[in-house]
Image (cartoon, helix red, strand yellow):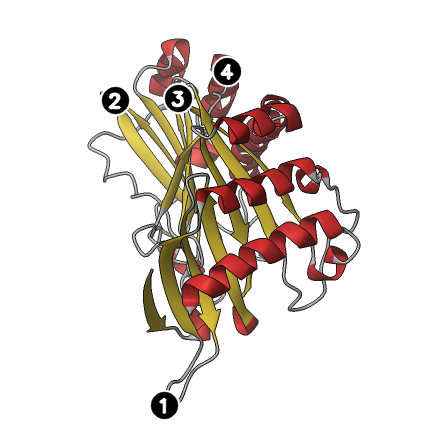
Amino acid sequence: MKKICCVIALGSLCSVSAMSATQDPEKKLTKAAIEDAARDLRGVEIALWEHPGVKTDGSSTVIRGDGTVVVSWRPYFPLSPDEKTTIRKYRLALSPDEVRKILRLFAVDEVLAMPKMRAELEGVREEIRFAVSLSIAGAGSFEGEHPNLEWSKLPQSPAARELIQAIRSSVQGLYDRIVKEDEGVLSKDRLTRLIDGGTADLALVLHDIQGPRGGKSLRLRADGSVEGVALVPPGQRQQGLQVCHFKGGVEKTRAAAILKSCVESGALDVKPERRHGIPEESLPALEIRATIDGATYSRSVSMWEGQVRDHPAFGKVRQALLDVAAEQLK
């Protein structure tokens, strides 16, 4: 078992990551070029960043002309030191009509006139803002910045709002569809068979860190391998929460028992009613991921700390994983 610790400052808890920005355009996009690209969607790439000042500190969503969706973000506390950025390609794609709808929302003078950087967004006034970009191979590129949609009091562009909302809505709809399909693929019976087979690429993940108070998160694979991260109080002559990454393993039979408990107890089927937490309340989450015929499927459930006692199946699996983490940290 290996353990690596470092010190963090609480002020860094809100750092997330994004994919790299579109390069400076060689050609300025026109409405005619956008309409031409909408016919076959070749060479089209649309991006939306949610970022707090620079696009290297935010999350991004990229939509390609073939409907491929790739999301990228930096986890607050990655399970492994090497997992600084999480990049996830959606298993399903947006339809051509959905991509065309978004693409044509760029072909508006009000959008194409948006500046690449807005001076009034600099500093603490806008902790989160949006940037949208469009690149069409051989035709040019565009990038514009916009204030936060939900709470900013700065001037906003109705056309840009419609564009940003369309991107978010389309991607959220696709995500919801994937979640529903994954629930069907990863049924209780199928997961049980995969666990009993002993050869499936399965992993159970617990996310259980509440920044100011710390906690533990880990990934337990079906083969018994374990990796995770813990935020623990400072020791003697230390200051600030200590971020400790750990790596090790448990017996394969024990890993299978925990996985099976999660599946057969119905922990993944829990649907907590309370949607909002109270200040500083933790939100533990369980996620099981399985790769089948080259495609990755997942199921997850989360609930606020105050709800855990009402769902003993969830609490039992959570505790089993926390016990594994505690053993690895010794």
Residue 25 drawn at (x, y percent): 24, 35
Mark 1 or 3 closer to N-term?
Answer: 1
Would you name the residue on which mark 2 appears? 137
Tell us which disc is closer to us: 4 or 2. Answer: 4
Disc 3 is placed on an element classified as loop
From the viewer's perspective, is residue 178 above or below residue 126? above
Give the amino acid at mark 3. Gly
Mark 2 or 1 closer to N-term?
Answer: 2
Q: Residues within 10 Å of mark 3 (few under 14, many from 20)?
A: few
Between 19 and 102, the one lying in front of the other is 19
Mark 3 or 4 closer to N-term?
Answer: 4
Tell us which disc is closer to us: 1 or 4. Answer: 1
Q: Which corner quadrant holds the N terminus?
A: bottom left
Would you name the residue on which mark 4 appears? 95
Would you name the residue on which mark 1 appears? 237
Mark 1 or 4 closer to N-term?
Answer: 4
Residue displayed at 25% across by 22% down: 137
Disc 4 is placed on an element classified as loop
Disc 2 is placed on an element classified as loop
Residue 150 drawn at (x, y percent): 61, 50
Mark 4 or 2 closer to N-term?
Answer: 4
Tell us which disc is closer to us: 2 or 1. Answer: 1
Give the amino acid at mark 1. Arg
Disc 1 is placed on an element classified as loop
Inter-mark Cα distance, 2 to 3: 30 Å
Q: How many marks?
A: 4
Would you name the residue on which mark 3 appears? 294
Observer able to see residue 284: no
Inter-mark Cα distance, 4 to 2: 20 Å
From the viewer's perspective, is residue 139 above or below residue 163? above
